[in-house]
């Protein structure tokens, strides 16, 4: 007997499934449970290798509040609070519609780009981002069209995506092919430029494979080609190339511990771009079912990256004082995000299944970034550690 | 600008690659490729085994790390940009 997620949590759910939902389950039952196995709540971001071709089985509304605070030694930097809303609904028997809206309220001082000088600038901004996706499912494949719009005081982004998913005959493998285009407009409040643009084309291919009855593995490759304005208009001497190509290879592997429902979730991503940055990111999480109502998931994430070719370290001149790029390079940037560093996140999440319809979740994470933590050494010198506390609370209703 | 359509662009440097390959082989040596029959997929169907099973959490996480680190992407395309990086 195939045990779906909801059946796992509540056997009496089956009795409460409305007839139209049962009809949808029946119509796509040939897809097997792999469609449910790796079933995510898909969104506008075309998830390259998410093994899903079936439509949503039920409606979902989720509300979440995400917040974080950045700190450097002795100083509080950026604070952000972001309420967000998700809605996903099945339409007819083969269509799904999903949408999200997020509002970011950001304030505080940006991180100092070099430790010994205070270059931080006070800022405050609001950002509203919306996404929407429409998916049409067929017996063994699905196609999804998505759009995204984001607007803030000095930045506007519009994106569209298209994704095709194809399931194998035995339903143990799903291929995914995705394309997307993004138009960004930048109009800094300091008028460093009047109006700049950036255009990005993205491509992705992925495959999700049921490796064994306890293991599912996903491989994704993405490539993005961006052209346009990449400078940080609020930093002096920040002049970056007008082209940036970014590639990623990522592998995700989930291992089930058996009937308990416990699972080990792992992922590794390699990133490379034409700014000269190479990065590895490793995620580990262990979902522990405490009882029928509570799941506890501790997690750890490690990220390491090299510096951009044009990032310059703080080298202080006895006469000039503040650091400047050595020589007269075409491109330069003091942005700490382009430096070489390592970062560690420790966190835990608790999921509370209130009843068959309602659930809530709570998450707390601690993030720290240091030059000395770069894998293999060679991190950028002179940067103050950056710490952040990330908290999140959410509630979900299924209907 | 460096050529982008090269296999090398998608590969880490050799020592890291060898290390990852060795690690992957060790991990998978205990679970040889054996796709399950339909009646064996119960464990795979559980919520804890899903990739990105919380859409809003995934979006928030990507946005947070995008504002602090240079690397991004890997799990999808077309999410749109923002001025935070």
Image (cartoon, helix red, strand yellow):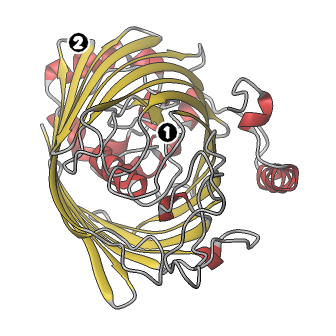
Q: CA distance from mark 1 to mark 2?
A: 28 Å
Q: Is A57 on the left-hand or right-hand side of A38?
A: left
**Residue lying at 49% horizontally and 39% vertically, measured from the top left:** B75
User: What is the x, y in percent for residue B2?
Assistant: 72, 32
Give the chain of mark 2.
A
Give the chain of mark 1.
B
Specify the farthest residue to the top.
A138
Q: Are both tags, 1 and 2, on one chain?
A: no
| Vertical arrangement, residue A185 with respect to residue A133, above or below | below
Q: Can see residue A122?
A: yes
User: What is the x, y in percent for residue A349?
Assistant: 35, 67
Camera-nearest residue between A156 and B40 = A156
Asked where in the image residue A30 lies, by quadrant, the reply is top left
C-beta proximity under 8 Å, tags 1 and 2: no
* The disc label shown at residue A93, or none: 2
User: What is the x, y in percent for residue A218?
Assistant: 60, 37
**Residue lying at 42% horizontally and 61% vertically, measured from the top left:** B68
Give the secondary structure at mark 2: loop
Asked where in the image residue A194 lies, by quadrant, the reply is top left
Residue, disc 1: B75
The quadrant of the image that shows the C terminus of chain A is top left
Camera-nearest residue between A368 and A277 = A277
| Vertical arrangement, residue A100 with respect to residue A380, above or below | above
Q: Is A75 on the left-hand or right-hand side of A63?
A: right
């Amino acid at each position: 007997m195939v045990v779906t997620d909801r059946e796992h949590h509540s056997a009496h759910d089956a009795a409460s499934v409305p007839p139209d939902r049962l009809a949808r389950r029946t119509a796509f039952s040939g897809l097997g449970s792999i469609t449910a196995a790796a079933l995510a709540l898909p969104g506008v971001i075309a998830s390259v290798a998410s093994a899903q071709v079936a439509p949503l089985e039920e409606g979902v509304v989720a509300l979440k509040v995400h917040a974080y605070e950045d700190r450097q030694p002795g100083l509080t930097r950026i604070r952000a609070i972001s309420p967000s809303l998700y809605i996903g609904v099945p339409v007819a028997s083969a269509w799904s519609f999903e949408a999200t809206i997020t509002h970011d309220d950001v304030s505080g001082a940006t991180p100092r780009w070099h430790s010994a000088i205070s270059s931080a600038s006070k800022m405050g901004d609001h950002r509203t981002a919306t996404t929407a996706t429409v998916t049409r499912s067929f017996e063994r494949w699905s196609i999804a069209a998505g759009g995204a719009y984001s607007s803030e005081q000095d930045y506007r982004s519009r994106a569209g995506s298209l994704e095709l998913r194809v399931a194998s005959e035995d339903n143990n493998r799903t291929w995914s092919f995705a394309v997307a285009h993004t138009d960004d407009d930048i109009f800094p409040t300091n008028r460093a430029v009047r109006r700049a643009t950036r255009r990005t084309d993205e491509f992705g291919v992925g495959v999700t494979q049921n490796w064994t009855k306890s293991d599912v593995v996903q491989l994704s490759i993405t490539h993005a080609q961006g052209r346009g304005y990449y400078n940080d208009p609020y930093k002096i001497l920040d002049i970056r190339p007008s082209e940036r190509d970014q590639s990623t290879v990522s592998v995700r592997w989930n291992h089930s511990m058996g009937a308990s429902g416990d699972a080990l979730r792992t992922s590794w991503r390699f990133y490379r771009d034409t700014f000269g940055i190479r990065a590895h990111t490793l995620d580990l999480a262990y979902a522990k079912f405490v009882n029928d109502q509570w799941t506890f998931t501790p997690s750890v994430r490690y990220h390491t990256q090299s510096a951009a070719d044009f990032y310059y370290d703080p080298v202080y001149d006895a006469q000039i004082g503040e650091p400047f790029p050595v020589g007269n390079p075409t491109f330069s940037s003091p942005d700490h995000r382009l430096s070489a560093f390592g970062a560690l996140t420790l966190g835990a999440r608790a999921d509370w299944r209130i009843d068959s319809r309602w659930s809530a979740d709570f998450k707390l994470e601690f993030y720290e970034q240091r030059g000395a933590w770069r894998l293999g050494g060679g991190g950028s010198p002179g940067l103050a550690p950056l710490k952040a506390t990330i908290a999140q609370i959410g509630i979900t209703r299924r209907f | 600008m460096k050529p982008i359509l090269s296999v090398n662009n998608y590969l880490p440097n050799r020592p890291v690659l060898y290390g990852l390959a060795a690690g992957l082989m060790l991990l998978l040596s205990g679970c040889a490729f054996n796709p399950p029959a339909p009646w064996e997929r119960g464990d795979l169907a559980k919520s804890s085994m899903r990739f990105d099973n919380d859409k809003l959490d995934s979006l928030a996480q990507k946005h947070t790390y995008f504002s602090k680190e240079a690397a991004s992407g890997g799990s999808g395309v077309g999410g749109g940009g923002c001025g935070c990086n």
